[in-house]
Amino acid sequence: MTTIDLNSIEASTLDRTVKGMPGHLTPIALKDIGGKGWNVLRQDLPLPLAVMRESALKHNSGWMRRYLEATGALIAPHGKTTMSPQLFARQVADGAWAITLGSVEQVQVARQYGFGRLLLANQPVGRQSQRYIVDELKRDSAFDFYCFVDSVALVRQLAAVVRDSGLKRPLQVILEGGFAGGRTGCRSLADAMTVARAIKAAAPYLSLRGVGGYEGLLRRPALEESTQAVDGFLKSLIDIAVGCDREGLFGEGEVLLTAGGTVFYDMVTKQFSAAQITRPFRVVVRCGCYLTHDSFSYVKSFEQLRARTPWVDDLGAGPAAALEVWAYVQSRPEPGKALLTVGRRDISFDSAMPTPLKWLRPDAGATAADLQPIGPDHVVTGLNDQHCHLQIPETSPLAVGDMVAFGISHPCTTFDKWQVICVVDDEYNVVSALRTFF
């Protein structure tokens, strides 16, 4: 049986070739970075620099824990957001039932560091991927693994791989429901039932353990339309579960009903918890971005969640942005424009442009108390590979050499731009660092 072991990550070496590390750095172990006495505001590190605020991580983790206690749901956070086993371990220690992953490559990373219960919210296709999963299940009898299926063809492939491998226990699968124009998943109840019956027929090689899907792509221009679309999709997943329950197609163990990205998880917990199936079941949400939150998209999404589910205000202040990317003002070539040292290689832009949050003139002795807010009249209008185009008032105080902190939208595509992300306290002292595996 494997156990979570991050020692090799903590012992891994940092040097000046790692993005965000100073040019004079001699090789050190990742675990020693907190002892360097570095402070972001003193310019001990070069910019651009991605940082995670420790206080926000703790706050967000506590908030989600209270939400899950209130709803009775489980969480299997989507690890593709951060691809940081150190954060996976933090989530497991905080009560996560499993870690969700989006590809077999990501599963390999999680297994390397000893994570014992994984949900692949995707279809494992291809010989290498399928054999790897089965070999891991053979190697470690305690490895608790689940994956999505949505076709009879894949059911037959997986059953053949399990049969030929000699694995003495079934591969646990989740029947995925989908919707027209979406990603994977059965498009109708009839199709889903056909796949479910094929899974049952594939015993003892496969076991149907639940029903799942992903509702996050159902966002519409009008909020009410989004809510109606998500509501309808979740009902369709429950219909699949009811059909499987009625025909006795589920395998041994509690039935898993799983959906819930970081936008509509309140709707998932409410609907799934009321599912009328006779078998004992558990609701598993897969929010990936709750731990880091953001400064734009998920801020809006959480306000919508509060409107739908007012009782969450009883849980205390909602999630806070933990991830920031810092840059210097490098040029003010026009009265209403500044260029900063951050670009597409450093920060997400797929969901929305970065949000300027605060700035600092890094004079000797400057501290977090000297940080100044940046108003909405400072707007990012574009990014190049290494440049940020910031529209500013002609009277803006920003000058060449000033430091600016940007909030991000969609954490996934900021994490994948950094091998190492520094964790800082509220004074911007570097207290630790995270490795990512993209």
Image (tube, grey):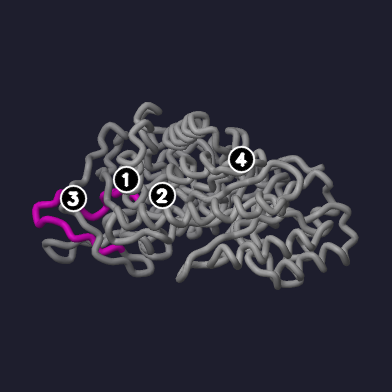
Give the mark nearest the N terminus, 2 or 1. 2
Per the rendering, the mark at residue 47 is none
Q: Look at mark 3 in the image and give the residue it sits on.
A: 376
Q: Are marks 2 and 1 in contact (CB under 8 Å)?
A: yes
| Mark 2 crowd level (few <14, some 14–19, many ≥20, 10 Å Cα) | many
* Disc 4: which residue: 282
Q: 127 left or right of 62? A: right
x, y percent for residue 156: 76, 69
Residue situated in front as seen by the camera: 108 or 209:
209
Based on the picture, tell me whether residue 252 belongs to the magenta stretch: no
Q: What residue is shown at x 20% (from left), y 53% (from top)?
A: 399
Badge 4 marks a residue whose secondary structure is: strand
Comparing marks 1 and 3, which lies closer to the viewer? 1
- Residue at which label 2 appears: 263
Residue visible at 37% across and 66% down in the picture: 386
The amino acid beneath tag 2 is Val
The dot on residue 304 is: 1
Which region of the structure is painted magenta? Answer: 388-407
In front: label 4 or label 3:
4
Whole-number angstrom distance, CA of label 2 to CA of label 1 = 9 Å
Spot occupied by residue 288 in the image (x, y as percentages of width and height)? 50, 49
Q: Earlier in the sequence, mark 1 or mark 3?
A: 1
Nearer the observer, disc 4 or disc 2?
4
Give the mark count.
Answer: 4
Q: Which residue type carries mark 3?
A: Pro
Q: Is residue 355 shown above or below 313? A: below
Q: Tell which tag, 3 or 2, sits nearer the viewer.
A: 2
